[in-house]
Image (spheres, rainbow, N blue to C red):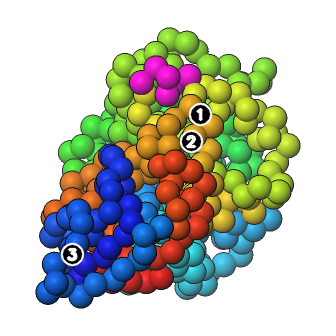
Amino acid sequence: MLAVRAGRLFDGERALGPGAVLVQEGRIVDVVTGDAPTAATLVDLGPDACLLPGLVDAHVHLAFDAGRDPVGAVEASDDRTLLARMREAADRALQAGITTVRDLGDRSFLGVELRGQLGADGPEILAAGPPITVRGGHCHFFGGEAEGAEAIRAAVKARRDRGCQVVKVMASGGNMTAGSDPERSQFGLADLALIVAEAREAGLPAAAHVHGPAAVADAVEAGFDTIEHVSFQTAAGVRADPRTLDRIAESQIVVSATVGRVPGRQIPDAVAQRLEAVLANHGRLHRAGARIVPGTDAGISTAKPHDVLPYGIVQLGGLGMTNREALRAATALAAEACGVGERKGRLRAGYDADLVAVAGDPVTTLSAVHDVAAVFRAGRRVR
């Protein structure tokens, strides 16, 4: 048995005093305060360390290289090259304490393949495979085009059969695909409801990429498990419908907020111009009681490398979350949103022994999440 001791614990919900997490065969067997059992092999992280559940990023793209032209890099790479790059991205995430990533779009189901290759040697990858989109639609280059009820049913079934952990649909256009309009819906309410129903039948959660106000409203009505971005983009700027905001809060659908960017790295002017308004709407949702988790969209730009989540956690504090709420959003709540809340995101007996230790106390100083001291994946120290 392994005992990982620290001067502080955050269990995914609340702060605890000095204690230890007891680990055996990759799982947590107990969380104790005070001294660890003498029979256990002790890893003492010191009195200034805080031990937390491994972090969960609810929205990444391991296939994107966080370079100046991530789409071009994908299109110029064969699958073996792309898979190797995804492996590097996954390792970078793990070294930052991100022990679970939800990959919401790749090519050729490479995320599923990488999940199988890495196992506990990398973060747990919850892969969507190619996102479902319309012909020539947002991220069509990943190969997930499907239109009409028959094609949609076949697309969801294919993701189940290929071993995906989530179904992703591009309900609106996007900002990274030539010819795609993020303000316009790509699927109507009936198709979105069908995707949700088919995903439920397959035993999979469903996530919807939404920018335009109509797409946001339809995704909420269709009953998706998570809605991504939620930017309310229009030709006149960011225009949130108050009724949709209220419905999001009332329904308790999870908002995967596109937070996190490395300071000093350039983002597109159009994104910068609407960012303040988008975050203001997220803050309004938080105050209304909506469930919000960090989904960084890691990989899409130089400002979003695959270890960017700690910046996103700090940014959640700017939405009005307390430090404890921001930490919970990136651990217990994010795990629930991604469909793995019964085994990840908490320091609790029976849960996976995915742990991160930081120097300092993030409950009082949220930026301490940047100072990673140790990472454990399935009970094995990887940093």
Circle 1 residues within 10 Å: few <14, some 14–19, many ≥20: some
For the question of whether residue 233 can be seen, the reply is no
Quickly name the residue at label 2.
316
Instruction: Indicate the position of residue 21 as horizontal and vertical percent values.
Output: 26, 69
Q: Which of marks 1 and 3 is in front?
A: 3
Residue 319 numbered tag: 1
Label 2: element kind: helix
The residue closer to the viewer here, 246 or 150, is 246
Question: Label 1 sits on what residue type?
Answer: Leu
> Could you tell me the amino acid type at mark 2?
Leu
Q: Is mark 1 on a helix, strand or loop?
A: loop
Q: Is mark 3 on a helix, strand or loop?
A: loop
In three-dimensional space, the C-alpha distance between marks 1 and 3, rounded to whole angstroms, equals 38 Å
Q: In this view, does 102 lie to the left or right of 150?
A: right
The residue beneath circle 3 is 36
Report if the CB atoms under discs 1 and 2 are less than 8 Å apart.
yes
**Among the 4 quarters of the image, the one containing residue 127:** bottom left
Chain part drawn in magenta: 284-289
Residue 109 against residue 223 in the figure, above or below:
below
Q: Give how far apart the Cα atoms at labels 3 and 2 are.
A: 34 Å
Q: Which of marks 3 and 2 is in front?
A: 3
How far across and down, in percent of the image, does residue 338 sit?
35, 51
Question: Where's residue 79, x and y in %?
Answer: 56, 80
Total marks placed: 3
Asked if the magenta segment contains residue 248, the reply would be no
Left or right of 374 on screen, residue 251: left
